[in-house]
Amino acid sequence: MMEPNNLLKEQLHLLHLDIINQSFAAKAVEYRKKGLDYVEYLADLVNEQVRHRQNRSLNQRIGAAHFPWIKVVEDFDFAYNKQPSRSTWLDLGQLQFLQKKENVVLIGPPGVGKTHLAISLGVKACEALHRVLFITAADLVTQLNTTKRANLLPDLLSKLSRLDLLIIDELGYLPIDAEEANLFFQVISRKYEKSSLILTTNKPFDEWGEIFKDPVLAAALLDRLLHHAHIIKITGKSYRMKGKEPAKPSIPQPDSPVSNSNPG
Ligand code: ADP
Ligand code: MG
């Protein structure tokens, strides 16, 4: 006959309870020594297994979201620029906008933390077991083009509409041609009132006609995007310049040329 411990190991393995399998014997010794309760012992083991599974599932969700890096709200210095206020952002972090299928649009110049904030909400959504994807507008357009050429556009569109949260970063840095604008419009209109979008852009809405080179399409797109949306305009300085501000010159200088070709 098999040793009870060996039989237990085999059965825990069959049930995929590997964390319990690793620690049940050592914990049994510990609990016996301390004279602790059987139920506490079982609860402790099950708790470890559940936490392990939750971590693994969070890591899988974060991996599937394709964040370029992980940023959290705790690392964001809300005092650096005026918007968004900490309370606005913490409120969004409650994720009610996801339940209500609302969108979040972050507008502002490069370096003010649009991508950081978008990722921080995306990570929170992953923690709350939502399906999230982060993609730059340029990559999205490329993927839409490629799948269209391979006759796989419907697959990509339905994959995108099944997400609970699609984060489109950096709209407006690159021009989009008429066909691409149409594809982009299909993504936005399929998500409209079905699930949420976070979009970051350097361009105010009145310049979107230029991004899409089609004011009518831009207006239709904005209509859907902004119908239920939290619009956050960040003005102020790039965080990349923090601590690098030049000393004030004693002689007035002519304005230096501003480059806006640098993507955030
Ligand atoms: P944007 O997307 O607006 O161009 P990013 O989110 O890429 O800006 O921010 C640029 C860098 O500065 C990132 O490393 C980001 O973490 C950091 N950063 C921006 N704003 C803040 C802030 N207010 N507090 C802390 N870090 C910030
Ligand atoms: Mg950015």
Image: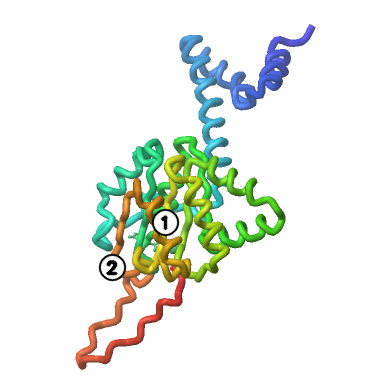
Q: Is residue 70 above or below residue 129?
A: below
N-terminal of the pair, mark 2 or mark 1, is 1
- Can you say which quadrant of the picture contains the N terminus? top right
Q: Quadrant of residue 208?
A: bottom left
> Residue placed at 53% from the left, 52% from the top?
186
Q: Is residue 239 visible?
A: no
Instruction: Give whichever of 19, 228 is nearer the camera.
Output: 228
Q: Mark 1, residues whose alpha carbon is within 10 Å: few (<14), some, or many (≥20)?
A: few
The label number, if any, that marks residue 21 in the structure image? none
User: Residue 240 at what x, y percent from top left?
Assistant: 38, 69
Q: Gap in Å between the C-alphas at discs 2 and 1? A: 30 Å
User: Residue 221 at what x, y percent from top left?
Assistant: 43, 56
Query: Disc 2 vs disc 1: Cβ atoms closer than 8 Å?
Result: no
Q: Is residue 142 visible?
A: yes
Q: Quadrant of ligand 1?
A: bottom left
User: Residue 105 at what x, y percent from top left?
Assistant: 37, 55
The label number, if any, that marks residue 236 in the structure image? 2
Amino acid type indicated by mark 1:
Ala
Say left or right for 49 vs 231. Answer: right
> Residue placed at 31% from the left, 56% from the top?
232
The label number, if any, that marks residue 220 in the structure image? 1
**Does mark 2's beta carbon lie closer than 8 Å to ligand 1?**
no
Q: Is residue 215 above or below residue 227?
A: below
Say left or right for 29 vs 203. Answer: right
Instruction: Give whichever of 39, 58 is nearer the camera.
Output: 58
Q: Mark 2, residues whose alpha carbon is within 10 Å: few (<14), some, or many (≥20)?
A: some
Is label 2 or label 1 in front? 1
Amino acid type indicated by mark 2:
Gly
